[in-house]
Amino acid sequence: MGVPKGTPVPIVKKLEEAFKKAMEDQAFLQTMAKMDVLPIYQSGDDVAKYLTSAYARYGKMIDDLNIPKEEEKK
């Protein structure tokens, strides 16, 4: 889940707390398991760190594989 950029911090924190609480709920976890979904909780800061890292890793992989940028395709 995500929120728009500029969402007030108190609202972000309240949503993070609600999602963390849901991730600890056994009924929710059982439902996710029945759907073959492995839920993983990450705070907004955790997600931002992951996406920054992933962006760098994928960018390097794209460069290493010489994949052309969209505007360079003919």
Image (spheres, grey):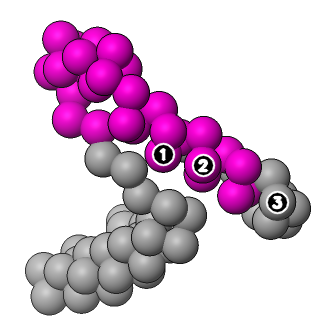
Residue to which mark 1 is pinned? 20
Q: Using the numbered discs, state the Cα–Cα distance from disc 3 to disc 2 in whole angstroms.
A: 11 Å
Q: On residue 17, which mark appears? A: 2
Q: Is residue 35 above or below residue 57?
A: above
Image check: 50 left or right of 32?
Answer: right
Residue 55 visible here? no
How far from the left and from the top, in percent, is residue 16? 60, 51
Q: Position of residue 14 (x, y in %)?
A: 72, 49
Residue labelled with disc 3: 10
Query: What is the magenta range?
Result: 12-39
Cα separation between marks 2 and 1: 5 Å
Q: In the rendered image of this protein, does residue 14 appear above or below residue 28?
A: below
Q: Is label 1 in a helix, a strand or a loop?
A: helix
Residue 34 part of the magenta-drawn span? yes
**Residue at x 25%, y 82% (from the top left corner):** 57
Confirm or deny contact between disc 2 and disc 1 (CB under 8 A): yes
In what quadrant of the picture does the N terminus appear?
A: top right
